[in-house]
Image (spheres, grey):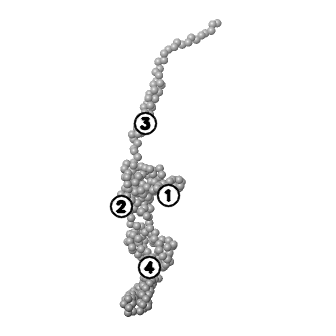
Amino acid sequence: MKACRIAPLPNRPSTRPDWRLGGIALGLSLLLGACSRAPEATTATAPPSEYAAVARGRVDIEGGLLALSMPREGTLANVTVHEGDHVKQGQLLAQLDIRPATLAVDAAQAQLEQAQAQMKLLGVKQAAAAQRAQRLAAAVAAGAGDGQSADDAREAAAQLDAEQQGARASLDMARQKLDEARYELKQRSLLAPFDADVIQVTAQVGASVSPSSGPLFTLLPNKPRIVRAELNESFVGTVKPGMHAEVSASTNSPDAHWSAHVLRIGKVYGPATLENDPQVRANARTVECVLAFDQPQNLRIGQRVTVRFDARAPASATSKD
């Protein structure tokens, strides 16, 4: 019995189209085209940065609020202002009991008058003694007088001259004591050093006060508002004096934006006291940047603001405080 062999099929060319290779090639070409165009689209749509730096700040005035205490110890006899009042320079704020100081002024005035009278009396005596000594000296020269008498008269005139010099020193001392007593009388009155608004009053009539008992009045001087911004150390080299900035409040009001410019930048690094995050506040290092408003503003002292330094505005070479 013969074994059967299966004859191999003849090779026939495939008639099915190679659509898979074509699809892969088309996908690769589209992917390469998209990758080559992606950087151009990103570069064209990214807007340039409008701000060179952003910092937290607060509204303040040069020198800050002024706390006043009574320069002398005593009992308050008069308080003339209240919180919210506006005071002028030299206006009386409070006064101690001035009777002891007034008595000291009166006593010093009496001593001065006594010294002036003594000086006047010695002046009259000295003039008379000098005239008598001159006449006796002339008589001795003419041979008609006693030499001893002339010497005694000359010595008496010299003695009165020395007494007059001592009286002149006593007169100067009496004037100094009077000036001192008047100065002490003024120290019993507390006056406003400049025009200001009274923010806080802790003085009460009848209270015993002293320079160490703390401030009695807190004044807000009538000075232009400024902004003290805490500039992060990474922006110190970017911000320059004279650079324009935009100051905005924490509210979303469209009117809470103000134009300002940089006055000066501090020389000392310090902590970020206005940062809300305790960890960031402990690690951040900032430099104080002081800005002035382009138009006078009546903002509240201590108000928190955000400062955006304009990168497009050129910085001036100099700045005025």
Q: Are marks 1 and 4 in contact (CB under 8 Å)?
A: no
Q: Which residue is mark 1?
A: 273
* Three-letter code for the amino acid on which mark 1 is drawn: Thr
The disc at residue 44 is none
* Three-letter code for the amino acid on which mark 4 is drawn: Gln
Q: Position of residue 317 (x, y in %)?
A: 37, 52
Q: Which residue is mark 3?
A: 38
- Give the mark toward the camera: 1 or 3: 1
* Three-letter code for the amino acid on which mark 2 is drawn: Pro
Q: Which residue is mark 4?
A: 176
The secondary structure type at the circle numbered 2 is loop
Q: Position of residue 97 (x, y in %)?
A: 46, 80
Q: Are marks 3 and 4 in contact (CB under 8 Å)?
A: no
- Could you say which is closer to the camera, residue 239 or residue 141? 141
- Could you say which is closer to the camera, residue 49 or residue 12? 49
Q: Which residue is mark 2?
A: 296
Label 1 crowd bin: few (<14), some (14–19), many (20+), radius 10 Å: some
